[in-house]
Amino acid sequence: MDNKSNFIYNIINQDLNFKKYTIIHTRFPPEPNGYLHIGHVKSIYLNFNIAKYYHGKCNLRFDDTNPDKESKEYVEAIKSDIQWLGFMWNGEVCYVSDYFEQLYNYAVELIQKGLAYVDELSIYAIREYRGTLKKSGQNSPYRSRSIKDNLFFFSKMRNGEFPEGSVCLRAKINMSDSSMIMRDPVLYRIKYTTHHRVGKSWCIYPTYDFSHCISDAIEGITHSLCTLEFQENRRLYNWILKNISITKHPIQYEFSRLNIKYIITSKRKLNLLVVNNIVDGWDDPRMPTISGLRRRGYTARSICEFCKRIGISRQDSYIELSELESCIRDDLNKHSLRLMAIINPIMVKIINLPTGYIEKIPMPNHPNDCSMGIRYVFFTQEIFIDRFDLDQYCKNSRFPKLTIGREIRLRHAYVIKVDHFKKDTEGNIISVHCYYDPTTLNRKPIDGRKIQGVIHWVSATKNISAEFRLYDKLFIHPTPDIVINILNIVNPRSLVISHGFVELNPIFSNNPGPYQFEREGYFILDYQYSKPTYLVFNRTVTLKKSNKSIRFIKPQ
Ligand code: ATP
Ligand code: MG
């Protein structure tokens, strides 16, 4: 079992040793106000794996207490993303909205105990009265209302007799507590929005702090795991459970959020990118959402491996994006078929081959795993190679490039030698004319001469047209989550589209990939844009951690 040495497993081991619990019960509590992102996976991986490891249970509970921003679409997307990651929740899906009646009754109980009151201060006044970290708060003039009046006003709130924002229910704790959270927090507010599950049956909605601890207790959660920003809320969590007549009292533990450089992990901000059409929906391959990563070609296995590698702690930090990329590279290196594709095509004509020449050359599908079999690739008189394999277009490369008189090997095929280039009137190369050495099919030249360099290629007549979508970071800022307007830091080159060719291979009709296109990276067919006669590929990741953008500089 992965990751089991982290501090949360240690706590659970101790609890089990002391026979505090017989069964371990966790939960994953997303708010259905957007799609899940890579940050959520850290929590999913922790909660579901704890349940698996201890033969316990993990609930999926939707925190659906804010109907303005929530929808069924998000509920369904979240469920399917969790399953795609390979996890399954215990029993039926839970919803906080299933507990609205119970929550209401617990709120009434607090009022009856003199521990909650209906406040008529506006939201702004409440903020004002709350004070600051240095200055203690002030009691609301409505704080001393009688229990009877509070019960009466709270039932009026429920019955829709107050306008939105005019009153709320607050806990009566301590307006001069050192923690702002304990200064009479709001427990219920009025909202007339239709809820995606309960429709118009409620017009008062519990806050996160009030509903979360009680939902945990109702479900019998033993360890309520959340991120560090809720550390202070733990006191309120315990205060509420202590003051209502509920028998279970789960314990909240916090761990650090996942932050990755150049990536945003906030549903609200990701939604901004969607509504402003910066991206092509929540599943745009540049999005750090589960659905975006999936469309990009990330496997569930690689995302889980990433969570395993980063571990769980209470230390806040930023993870390098390259760590995520190295997980998908390692995975695809093992499991993906090798094929050839030309992203920036330039024609090569082989002078000493007859017109219409076709040869089928066998090639391994994986260099180290012969169980992946072989395929046949068409070798013809005219082929495409990549423009950037010409010396003219890539002067900075460390690798030998094609130039007049130099020999180079075509991958798994023959050695060719450039005789001349055909150029247009402006001096741009439009085709390369070569001789090939027929004795060099997948073997060294007989005379022992050295050939430096291997390039990939695709037949110019037996191929499939394809579009390649090459992705880069979505933001130019390393910590976009602290930038006020993220729309100002979008990388204008986060998507570069190139047109080219892939080898003629029937596999594309029944397997979307990801594939390794030799020397180019890992690619997956895009399910939305791809057609049988025009394939569209998303580049999942480049082959090596390198700045490949040099390949996209337009030739002068
Ligand atoms: P967002 O700002 O994206 O809406 P959130 O925390 O408000 O994030 P929820 O849907 O309420 O989103 O989160 C569900 C669970 O996922 C919570 O337990 C939360 O702590 C956890 N979670 C969310 N973001 C991260 C993250 N970046 N790293 C680790 N856990 C996270
Ligand atoms: Mg939230």
Image (cartoon, grey):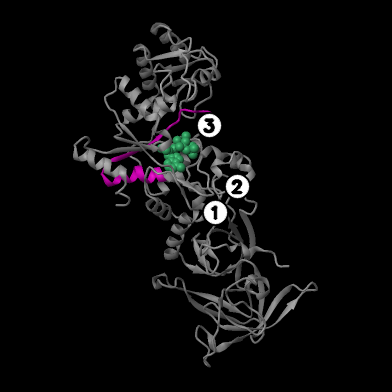
Identify the mark nearer the N-term, 1 or 3: 3
Answer with left or right where residue 451 lies relative to residue 423.
left
Residue 497: mark in rendering: none
Quadrant hosting residue 99: top left
Q: In this view of the protein, can residue 532 be seen by the observer?
A: yes
Magenta stretch holds residue 47: yes
Residue 254 lies, in percent from the top left, at 37, 37
Residue 463: image location, x then y, percent: 60, 70
Q: Looking at the figure, which quarter contains the C terminus?
A: bottom right
- Residue 498 counted in the magenta span: no
Q: On residue 69, which mark appears?
A: 3
Classed neighbour count for the residue bearing mark 2: other residues with Cα under 10 Å, few (<14), some (14–19), many (≥20):
some
To which residue does mark 2 refer?
280
Which tag is nearer the camera, tag 2 or tag 1? Answer: 2
* Extreme residue toward the front, this view: 134
What residue type is disc 2 on? Answer: Asp
Mark positioned earlier in the residue sequence (3 or 2): 3
Q: CA distance from mark 1 to mark 3?
A: 28 Å
Which residue is at the front of the view, 335 or 491? Answer: 491
Question: Which residue position holds label 1?
Answer: 527
Can residue 202 be seen here? no
Chain part drawn in magenta: 42-68
Which quarter of the figure has residue 173?
top left
Marks 2 and 1 in Cβ contact (< 8 Å): no
Q: In the image, what residue type sits under mark 3?
A: Lys
What amino acid is found at the position of numbered circle 1 in the picture? Tyr
**Kind of element beneath mark 1:** loop
